[in-house]
Image (cartoon, rainbow, N blue to C red):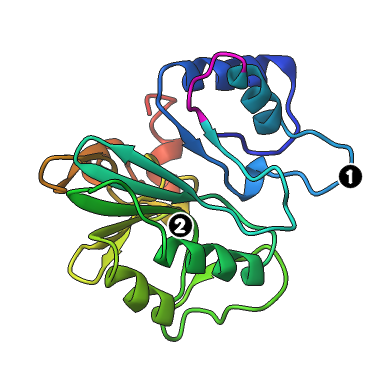
Amino acid sequence: LFDTPSNNENTIMQGYSVLSGITGCIAGNHDIVNRAGAVSSLQLLKEIFAGTNEFKIILNSDLGSPYTCVIAHDNLGLTLVPHAMTQKLFCESLDIALNATTANPGYRVLGLHCNVGVPGYADPTDDGTTLFLTQDYQERLLNVYDRILVGHEHVPHSFHQGRLQILGNVFPLGFGEIANRYRYVLDTETCELEAIETFNSDEHYLELPVGDLLASNGEY
């Protein structure tokens, strides 16, 4: 939700406005503060919404322990795992998710905030805040869950015949990330995932030689 754990009042109010219009938010690495006694912007908003008895923010208040949140929603069993401080804690949270149960769900969906480990891309480590959903965990979790939806990585991508979907950002954050972007709608009755385009690189991005740009007299 935030780019940094600590934000000014206007940004926090913007975050409050966003959360007021949605069901829930999984805490990511930018939403976590690891200083004793410090409260992140997302933690502050969690405390505000806690008084309304509304489910809003999936955030582990004990960063030294594994954490998952299980929600039964109509025909869907939803398990959510927010960002963890180490790979070890993340794996322990995934182990909990492997055994999590909900009341007779028609479909089971897992929501994560991490990198997706693929051969040749990067290797997970036991420490640090870079988390990886390894090949081993991908296969084990997909024996339990119908779909895995992953936040954190900027560029959307799918694996395992679309059952594991990296959602990506809804717009590119740099020139090196120019590509079509989407928001996603999950049908809770069928577990089908619909991609709705939010950025089209052919329509929304124009690349010109510098000479053409200078000769345009500011028309671009």
- Residue 121 located within the stretch drawn in magenta: no
Q: Residue at x 20, y 63 (%)?
A: 162
The residue wearing badge 2 is: 176
Quadrant location of the C terminus? top left
* Residue 32 location (% of width, % of height): 69, 44
How many other residues sit within 10 Å of disc 2, few (<14), some (14-19) or many (≥20)?
few
* Residue situated furthest bottom in the rendering: 120
The residue wearing badge 1 is: 36
Q: Secondary structure at mark 1?
A: loop
* Residue 64 location (% of width, % of height): 75, 57
Judge from the rendering whether residue 52 lies leftward or rightward of residue 4; answer left or right: left
**C-alpha gap between disc 1 and disc 2:** 37 Å
Judge from the rendering whether residue 185 lies leftward or rightward of residue 174; answer left or right: left
Q: From this view, report whether residue 64 is shown above or below residue 126.
A: above
Q: From this view, report whether residue 85 is shown above or below residue 29.
A: below
Looking at numbered disc 1 in the image, what kind of residue is underneath it? Ala
Of callouts 1 and 2, the N-terminal one = 1
Instruction: Give the image quarter of residue 97.
Output: bottom left
Main secondary-structure element of the magenta-colored stretch: loop
Quadrant location of the N terminus? top right
* Residue 163 location (% of width, % of height): 23, 63
* Residue 185 location (% of width, % of height): 22, 38
Q: Nearer the viewer, residue 191 or 15?
A: 191
Chain part drawn in magenta: 51-56
Q: From this view, report whether residue 46 is shown above or below residue 70.
A: above
Q: Secondary structure at mark 2?
A: helix
Which of label 1 and label 2 is nearer to you? 1
* Residue situated furthest left in the rendering: 190
Looking at numbered disc 2 in the image, what kind of residue is underneath it? Gly
